[in-house]
Image (cartoon, rainbow, N blue to C red):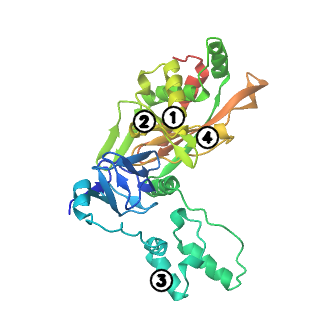
Amino acid sequence: MAVIDVRMFAEQKEGTESFVASWLKQPGDRVGAYEPIVEISTDKVSMEVPAPAAGVLAEILKAEGEPVAPGDVLARIRTDAAAEQERPAAGPEPKEAPAESADAAGLTPAVRRLLKQHNLDPSAIPSSGRGKRLTYQEVADFIEKRKGSAKPASRMVPHTPMRRAIASHMARSMQTAPHVTAVFEADLSRVLADRETRRAAGEPPSITAYLVRAAVAALAEVPEANARWHEEGLEIFEDFNIGIGTAVEGGLMVPVIHRARELTLEQTAARLRELTDRARAGALTPEEVAGGTFTISNHGVSGSLLAAPIVIPHDQAAVLGAGKLQHRAVVVEGRIEARPMMYVTLTIDHRVLDAQRTNAFLAKFVETLQSGLFS
C-alpha cells in the first residue's frame, strides 16, 4: 500500500521546542498536494506543515499539544493511487468510527488507569480540554467532587503550546547559565526633545528605536555582550541582530532587527514598526525571529519600573531590560528638577561577562541616550 509519511521540518534552531498546535485535517479527510494539514507552534513562531502528496489523511501520530522534534513522523497519507486501488467495487461507504472510540484514543495511560481504578465511564465526565480529551486533573476533580470533597472551586486552563515552550525555555536558561543583573538609570530628556523635533516631519521614532541605537553603540564598545558561550571558547558575532520582546496574545514573541549596526535611527524605527505589526498579526516568518544575537525587553511599556529579564543561554550572552519612562526628582547641578528617567538593566551570562564589562556596557548605553547624538 502506497503510504507517505508527513514529517516535521528537518531543520530547527538549537534550543527551540516545537509542539503540535492544531490539526487542520482529520483522518479520512482528503488533502491536496502541498495543502497545509497541521499547525506547529514554538515559543517564537507558528508554521504550517503541508501534505507531501495528494490523497487521504490515513493516520495522525502526534496529538495536539504533543512535543515534536525535527524529522518526527506527524501523520501518514494514503496516496490517490492507493486509495483508488483499495476502494470497494460497490456497496456503501465505510462507516465512521463511533465517537466513543475516537475519545478513547485520546486518553493517556494515566487517565485510563484512574478511570479503571474508580470504575468510571469517561463519557460521564465533562472535559474542557481541546478536542474533548479528558485530562488526569479533570478525572481527579470529578472523583473529589463525587466524594463530597471540600476542595476549593477551580478550573483548569490548558497550556497553549507557546506557553509550554516559553516555560521550558526559561527553566532551562536558569539551570544552564549563572545570571547576574546590573541596574543603571538614564535621563531621556534629550531623547524626548529629539522626538519632538522629528515629529514635525512625520511620525517620530518610538522610544524603543532609540534604545536599539544606544544598544548598537554599547555593543560596539563591549563586543562580548554580542556573543554566545561554548565550552571550547566564546563566539563573538560581527552582526548586531537585536531581538525585541513583543507582547502578543498568549505570550511573547521576539522579532529580530537584523544587522542593526548598518541602520539609521529612521530605518530602525521603520523596521521596528513593521516587525511589531507583523508579530501582533501573527504574520512573522521563521526568518524574522531567527538569528538574534542580543535582546531588548522594553517591559516599561506595560508599567513595570524595574525587571531582570532572562538570558537565552543557547544563543546569547545578555539581555537588556528597559523600565517605565517616569518623571522623577533628580539633583542637577545642585538643583532639584523633574526629569524623564528610566531604569535600565543588563542581565548577563556570568560565564561570558564580568561586572566591569557589564558596567562598561551600561555606561556607554546611558551615555548614548543622554548625548543627544542620534544617528
Q: Which mark is residue 120?
A: none
Q: Look at mark 1 in the image and give the residue it sits on.
A: 278
Residue 74 visible from this viewpoint: no
Q: Look at mark 3 in the image and give the residue it sits on.
A: 113
Where residue 206 appears, as percent x and y from the top left, is 60, 26
Mark 4 or mark 1: name the one nearer the start of the chain: 1
Mark 3 or mark 1: name the one nearer the start of the chain: 3
Q: Nearer the viewer, residue 24 or 167?
A: 24
Q: Look at mark 4 in the image and give the residue it sits on.
A: 299
Q: Name the mark nearer the viewer: 2 or 1.
A: 1
Distance from disc 4 to disc 1, alpha carbons, whole Å, reads: 19 Å
- From the viewer's perspective, tell me whether residue 83 is left or right of residue 65: left
Q: Report which quarter residue 204 is drawn in.
A: top right
Mark 4 or mark 2: name the one nearer the start of the chain: 2
Q: Amino acid at mark 1?
A: Arg
Q: Amino acid at mark 4?
A: His
| Residue lying furthest front | 90
Mark 3 or mark 2: name the one nearer the start of the chain: 3
Q: Look at mark 2 in the image and give the residue it sits on.
A: 288
> Element under label 3?
helix
> Element under label 2?
helix
Q: Name the mark nearer the viewer: 4 or 3.
A: 3
- From the viewer's perspective, tell me whether residue 91 is left or right of residue 186: left
Where residue 105 appears, as percent x and y from the top left, is 43, 72
- From the viewer's perspective, tell me whether residue 76 is left or right of residue 169: left
Q: Taking 324 as reference, is 144 above or below it?
A: below
Mark 2 or mark 1: name the one nearer the start of the chain: 1
Q: Amino acid at mark 3?
A: Arg
User: Mark 2 touching mark 1, by CB under 8 A?
Assistant: yes
